[in-house]
Amino acid sequence: MFRDVIQFKGLDVGKGLRLIKGNSGEWVRLLGSRDKSELSLEGTHLLVAGGRTPNTSGIGLDQAGVETTERGHIRVNEHLQTTAEGVWAEGDCAGSPYFTHVSQDDFRVVIDSIAGRSRVTTGRQVPFCLEVSSPNLFPPPIPSWRSRTPP
Ligand SMILES: Cc1cc2nc3c(=O)[nH]c(=O)nc-3n(C[C@H](O)[C@H](O)[C@H](O)COP(=O)(O)OP(=O)(O)OC[C@H]3O[C@@H](n4cnc5c(N)ncnc54)[C@H](O)[C@@H]3O)c2cc1C
């Protein structure tokens, strides 16, 4: 769908490009190859879609008894409890959908779990959207103590 939207705006979508070199300044210039032929691109902006992987290796999780999944996320249950007693994980590293509002809700789940209440991550509604405004139009509510102007 995103591809349709931006093609409607007259933009080209390039996949499978192998980058050889690039320059930026007033213009972005890329030299690469696609399907074994050389390709040169020029424009005002460069939009890169990259993947993300959890940064959980090499920090001793195994020594703490905290297991990870095949994809590197910390293994948690619906209360975000890890495999080590008294240890919770939340947000991206715990494999929750990669959104700010989800990591914020994960916080509520963890707090409730610590307090012995029963909030869970399963069955919650997760809005999936692409935010294209800067700053975000709908930031999470700021607690009143943070929104006050400093003296
Ligand atoms: C480019 C980009 C754009 C995004 N746009 C949106 C958007 O428009 N809307 C949206 O909802 N979400 C967006 N997200 C996703 C959102 O930012 C994340 O889902 C959210 O920040 C996850 O929160 P978190 O607390 O799990 O992790 P993070 O916000 O990544 O916080 C993890 C923290 O842990 C620290 N840390 C990591 N390793 C260690 C260590 N070994 N020791 C100590 N500290 C450590 C990091 O420095 C970081 O401060 C975007 C993400 C990216 C990368």
Image (cartoon, grey):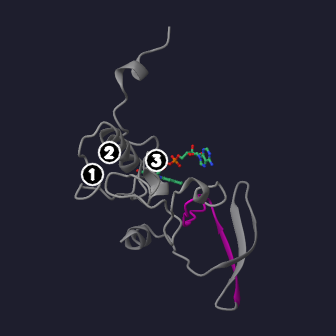
Decide if ligand 1 comes within 8 Å of the CB at mark 1.
no
- Element at label 1: loop
First of labels 3, 2 by sequence position: 3
Q: Which residue is mark 3?
A: 87
Please state the horizontal and vertical placement of residue 140, each as a whole percent of the image.
36, 38
Q: Residues within 10 Å of mark 2 (few under 14, many from 20)?
A: many
Q: Which mark is residue 120?
A: 1
Q: Main secondary structure of the magenta part?
A: loop
At a point 40% along the width and 48% down the height, the residue shown is 103
Q: Which mark is residue 109?
A: 2
The type of residue carrying mark 3 is Val
Residue drawn at x 69%, y 59% is 27
Q: Secondary structure at mark 2?
A: helix
* Crowdedness near tag 1: few (<14), some (14–19) or many (≥20) residues, C-alpha within 10 Å: some
Q: Which residues are magenta?
A: 37-56
Q: CA distance from mark 3 to mark 1?
A: 16 Å
Q: Callout 3: helix, strand or loop?
A: loop
| Mark closer to the chain start, 2 or 1 | 2
Q: Is mark 3 within 8 Å of ligand 1?
A: no
Q: Quadrant of residue 40?
A: bottom right
Name the residue type under label 1.
Val
Please determine whether, in this image, residue 56 is positioned above or below residue 104: below
